[in-house]
Image (tube, helix red, strand yellow):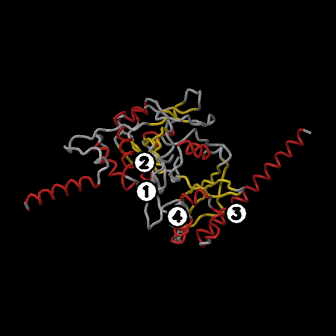
Amino acid sequence: MKIRLLVFNLLFSSLAWAGADCIHCQSYLPLEESRPWPIEYIKVDKVQYERNSHASFCTRPLEILDTIVLHHSETPSTVSAEKINDYHLTRGTATDPWYMIGYSYVINSAYPGASLPKLKVTEGRPLEIIGAHAGTNAFVPMSAEQKKIWDEKKVKCGKEGEEGEFDPSMVKDGKIKANVTTLGLVVIGNYAPFSKTNPDGYSRRNPRHPTKSTLDSVARMSCQLQKKHPRIKNIKWHNYYHNTSCPGLLKNYIGRIKALARMYGCEFN
Amino acid sequence: MRIQLIIIMALFSLNILASEDQEMKELFKKYDLVMDHKRIELIDDVFTKNFIKGSGGKEELISKIKDLTIPKEKALKKDHISWKKGQKGEVYLATLEEHSTLKNKKEVHKAEFIILKEDGKFKINGTLSDGD
């Protein structure tokens, strides 16, 4: 009897341990770890954004994409994708106007303990249009495939209605602008500490960590993108490219996001 | 007559711009007082109601401000505030530069503040992550 109780306890505690850190355990507990979880695709909302027709923008073949860059918006968590578009249009100057929102995907997800906003993913700048998020002065090495696309002059810049021209300034010393080969995925919210330049940040006594639902949505969205564009193999974060507090504490969860994506059958470096 | 009208209009808009510029500088002077000198009685003059609510309420915001220590090697370059009105007129973006005061460190961090008019006065409604 004692042995049976011991075995039962052992089984129960191992199940509880497995469930403690598992997002899907309530609905689905994988029996074989090697089998990927069935991915429940995230519905991506589309929005008719206001665009600045005076601004120029660049287009790219999607085969040049290889990296997802994670951001936080540093705004309150309830801000919409349309509002970010307004801010980014405002951010442009007369000499350097912005065409539209700089990120490719926007994730609205609640802070810990909050019920709003409800999880929502919105498409930002279409993937074919080079984003404005990683830093215009950030350059990265090119793979042989990316170099081939570049050499074929398939990246073109111009204004609405124009054919677009090849812009050689996007490559410097054999490296290409990070914005060309990446897409920006932003989690709306502020995951950096309170400071004079970030008055909406979290208190140091009470760090604002992303919820499991937020991490899961980033992982699923990343996996979804990889399944559609298999060349996307990396997940990086904003301050990998330049000195900024973005994406705050989200950066600490990149490993976790990749692990979750692996459970869904996707592999990221 | 038409030229006179244009001149009057131009002068009028210049006047508005100058007064808004002054108002923006005043806002960030108050912001310095709140953040650097813990003048928490000015919180309502500096932040919008929505911002205070979103920060977890006034008490939470006050406790964050009281806990804040400004590193000596960092300073906001107060005379370097640039701002502009949003396309739809309701939002203003103000950019401040934070410079390292250490001679060997040339770090510059730009902070973008979202400013709204509340009760006819400029107030901070949040910040915006950088990136271009």
What amino acid does circle 4 point to?
A: Ser
Q: Chain of mark 4?
A: A
B73 relative position to A63: left or right: right
Callout 3 amino acid? Glu
On the question of residue A190 being in view, the answer is yes
Nearer to us of marks 4 and 1 is 1
- Disc 2 on helix, strand or loop? strand
Real-space CA distance between mark 3 and mark 4, rounded to the nearest whole angstrom: 20 Å
Q: Position of residue B9 (x, y in %)?
A: 83, 45
Single out the mark in the foreground, 3 or 1. Answer: 1
Pointers 4 and 2 within a single chain: yes
Q: Are marks 2 and 3 on the same chain?
A: no
Q: Is residue A88 above or below residue A41?
A: below
Query: Which residue corresponds to mark 4?
Result: A195
> Is there CB contact under 8 Å for labels 4 and 2?
no
The answer to whether B10 appears left or right of A173 in the picture is right
Query: Which mark is drawn over residue B26?
Result: 3
Disc 2 versus disc 3: distance between alpha carbons? 36 Å
Q: Residue at x 77, y 52 (%)?
A: B16
Which residue is the extreme one toward the front?
Answer: A1
Please report whichever mark, 4 or 1, sits nearer to the chain's N-terminal start.
1
Q: Could you tell which of marks 1 and 2 lies nearer the N-terminus? A: 2
- Find residue A113 and name its label: 1
Against B8, is A157 above or below?
above
Q: Nearer the viewer, residue A6 or B65?
A: A6
Question: Percent x, y for residue A38?
Answer: 29, 38
Q: Are marks 2 and 3 in contact (CB under 8 Å)?
A: no
Residue at image mark 2: A70
